Image: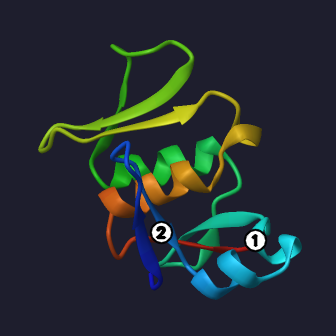
Amino acid sequence: MSGVWVFKNNGVIRLVENPQAEHGGSDQARHRRKVLVYLPTGQVITSYQTLEQILRGLGWEIYNGGDPDLFQFHKQSSIDLISLPREFSKFSSIYMYDIVVKNPNIFHVRDA
């Protein structure tokens, strides 16, 4: 995962993979669709069912104590919580990067 981490005033951070494209590139390059890749196999995650299977294998469990509008995972060995929109069609790069940060060297986000 390479790029530049951008820290906003509200405490939110995000990874900008290609800062030149973001600041001077075309709108098409900036709004390119992203996909989450499971690095050990190179598999592109195309459903929550696939993602859940992989996360469970990494020790994550479904968390039912939170917001009912979210699909959440918790790891017993940490305080981390992964919160995703219920609908996979709303699974955007911000959620993908959250998964990458909490599972380094396991997932990667790239252009589709």
What is the three-letter code of the residue carrying label 1?
Arg
The x and y percentages for residue 79 are 16, 38
What is the secondary structure assignment of the residue under circle 2? strand
Q: CA distance from mark 1 to mark 2?
A: 13 Å
Give the residue number, with chain letter if any, for mark 2: 15
Say above or below: 47 vs 65.
Answer: below
Q: Write the residue at 14% across / 43% down.
A: 78
Q: Amino acid at mark 2?
A: Leu
Viewer-proximal residue among 51 and 36: 36
Q: Residues within 10 Å of mark 1 (few under 14, many from 20)?
A: some
Q: Is residue 105 above or below residue 6?
A: below
Where does label 1 land, which residue? Answer: 30
Q: Which mark is residue 110?
A: none
Residue ID at (47%, 68%): 15
Q: Position of residue 92 (x, y in %)?
A: 65, 50
Where is residue 70? Give x, y as percent: 52, 24
- The answer to whether residue 108 shows anywhere in this view is yes
Where disc 1 sits, the SS reads helix
